[in-house]
Image: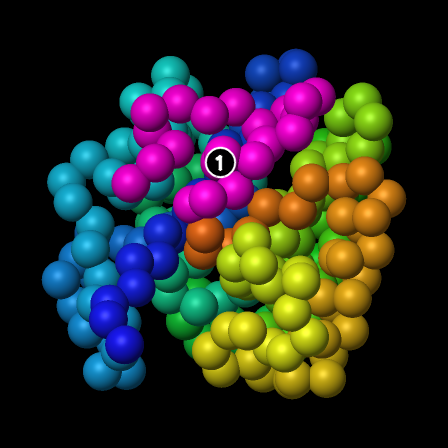
Amino acid sequence: MGDLTLPVYAYLITHPSGRTMLFDAGLAPSHHDQTVSKVFRNELPEGHDVAARVLAAGFDPARVEGIVASHSHYDHIGGIALVPNARIFIHQKEDLRELDTGHDLVRTDDSLDLFGDGSAEVFATPGHTCGHQSVRVWREGGADILAGDACYFCRSLDREDTDQPYPFDKAQYLETKRRLVQMRADGNFIVPGHDESFLDNIPRGSAIRVSPLSRL
């Protein structure tokens, strides 16, 4: 087997009012060129951290008001320190030992109306970790679902196995995956956690906007 490149994503969610939130925060600059668990070698070139990407997209990282952390693995929360004024939305069951940035925390439950107007919902998708959560952004005809590591690859929803490393609870993960399969069948677009190929399959009407910043 050869090497496999896994992109690490953070998503900027913009509200018509001008408010901004992030879903995940990617790697920290200190993670660059580190090897983790003798398996993963991290790469984060200069200018590719979450704050630099938010700034390049025309927004001020200091004005991002919240970060929804899908879970507390380092490649999803590493960049939180670069977004200084955000509150961190993290599920009440999720392990906080790796989250020590000093930000205000909001401990979520199974569902949270992110902006308070029904436009985006944080909802629990456990299995990869005990407190994993995803975000559903509503748009005409359905929703775009930022699945995080509840769906690792585009192919994951078409497989019956776990199809990812280190699930916290395999049975729970598979049940969550079945829920995502049904959401896809209902016309929603599932965005996987670590698979760039979704960028080539964004459906018409999706709220997802692709730019040169979206690709490795």
Element marked by disc 1: helix
- For the image, the number of numbered tags is 1
Q: How is the image coloured?
A: rainbow
Return the residue nearer the eye: 106 or 7. Answer: 7
The stretch in magenta equals 196-216
x%, y% of residue 188?
Answer: 76, 40
| Left or right: 64 in relation to 162 | left
| Left or right: 164 in relation to 212 | right
At a point 77% along the width and 48% down the height, the residue shown is 184
Considering only vertical position in the picture, is 192 above or below 156? above
x%, y% of residue 148?
Answer: 56, 56
As drawn, the residue found furthest toward the front would be 1
**Is residue 36 located in the magenta-colored stretch of the structure?**
no
**Is residue 215 located in the magenta-colored stretch of the structure?**
yes
At a point 45% along the width and 55% down the height, the residue shown is 194
x%, y% of residue 117?
Answer: 81, 28
Return the residue nearer the eye: 188 or 99. Answer: 188
* Residue highlighted by disc 1: 199
Point out the image quarter for the N terminus: bottom left
Q: In this rendering, does residue 76 appear at all?
A: yes
Q: Quadrant of residue 116?
A: top right
Q: Quadrant of residue 176?
A: bottom right
At a point 51% along the width and 73% down the height, the residue shown is 164
Amino acid at pointer 1: Leu
Point out the image quarter for the C terminus: top left
Q: In this rendering, does residue 21 appear at all?
A: no
Considering only vertical position in the picture, is 170 above or below 138? below
x%, y% of residue 59?
Answer: 41, 20
At a point 19% along the width and 73% down the height, the residue shown is 35
Q: Main secondary structure of the magenta part?
A: loop
